[in-house]
Amino acid sequence: MPKSFSLRSAQTVAVLSVTQLVGWGTSFDMLGVMGRVIAPDLGLSNEVAFSGLTIMMVVGGLASPVTGRALARLGAAKVLAASSLAFALGLLVLAASQGIILYAIAWLVMGIAGAMGLSAPAYAAVVEREGLNGKRIITIMMLFTGLSATIFWPLLTLLTAHFGWRATFVICAAGHLFVCLPLYLLALPRPILAEQGDAGHRTPPVPLSAKGKRRAFVLIAAATTISTFVTFGLAPSLLEIFRQYGASPALALQLGSARGIIGISARLVDMLLGRRGNPLLSAIIGIGLMLSGFLLLLVAGASTAQLVIFTLLFGFGSGVMAVARALLPLALFSRSEYGLHSARLSLPQNLANAVAPVVFTAILDRAGAPTALAVCVVLSLSSLLLVLALGLLVRRATAAGALLAKA
């Protein structure tokens, strides 16, 4: 471990990794195991049951700007603690549901909880406590939180088999109340600003004007929203894409499973780079790798070898881009603004994630895999051009700042 990774940093990583695992595992990932179990008991179709995730993501996106203001005013620890209470309430309402009304209300509450507790608020907590070292800590934390489904799918399956799905939701609510809430309130280190009065927390790493900041935010929002639309839209449909390109069911399942592991390995590479990593360069590489994978299947057709290469390119590229999305605001805006901007970026990203699977499923069913990949090429190229425009903006601002410093 580098010298900058102190006991304090390890404590921050441990607290936020555990709480993010619980948060993702008992909300977004949970329906992968529980959806088809609870749907018959509530008299719902599987499609309606899984629409809970759409409600959660839409509500979470709409609530994100309010969360951003709360992060700036109250600090991340209090916002995260409130999310534990909201998650517990949502899970208890799920446990008590008898039909679609309470079920929908529960996911509405879970959406509010997700806005306050998943990803952006946790990253803001890291930046509050780690300052410039936050980039590395966020990447390390993402290594662990990427395993939420791997850990919680078998755990939820075991709990449901022994206690039933209603009791399982009550146990999950207890996890938020008696594990996550105390960790947020008692185990998170104090923010570095409160302890050291860090004067540099309001100084952005790039000397952007007010107009430049607005333009940079729009470019980041557009580029990351398009890329996450592609990733979230395509990932659930990978098995169908592999099938349409001639893969056997066994091979399709192997490739689909490998994609998640490859994505986590990409985060590991970014972690090893540490401070030498550049989120702008990571974004260019990540989008470029995905674009190469889409073009490979479109131009060269499909064989087993090409499907394997596509899986490597898409898996690694999407993993690199996941890290870049989290770190881009920290590369351009001051640490004091990070939480606010990250939460605001969650609005378009969550809305895109909510509709992307439906859009890509419709394209695949009606026009086929080549058309879906062609759409991915156009969208990925657009995202890449936006990131390049952002890089040009940063380069000009840095050059102008250097000239002013010499004057």
Image (tube, helix red, strand yellow):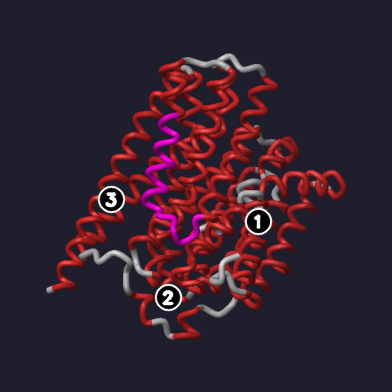
Count of numbered labels shown in the rendering: 3
Q: Position of residue 170 (x, y in %)?
A: 75, 57
Q: Secondary structure at mark 1?
A: helix
Q: Earlier in the sequence, mark 2 or mark 1?
A: 1
Count residues near mark 2 (Cα–Cα under 10 Å), then give few for <14, some for 14-19, many for 20+: few
Q: Is residue 155 above or below residue 80?
A: above
In the picture of the structure, the residue carrying the numbered disc 2 is 73
Residue type at tag 1 = Leu
Task: Residue 237: name its quadrant.
Answer: top right
Q: Is residue 162 above or below residue 276?
A: above
- Judge from the rendering whether residue 389 lies leftward or rightward of residue 378; answer left or right: left
Badge number at residue 390: 3
Q: Which residue is mark 1?
A: 21
Q: Earlier in the sequence, mark 3 or mark 2?
A: 2
Q: For the residue labelled by badge 2, is the local secondary structure a helix, a strand or a loop? A: helix
Kind of residue at disc 2: Arg
Q: Do the CB atoms of the residues marked 1 and 3 lie less than 8 Å apart?
A: no
- 351 or 146: nearer the eye? 146
Stretch in magenta = 273-292
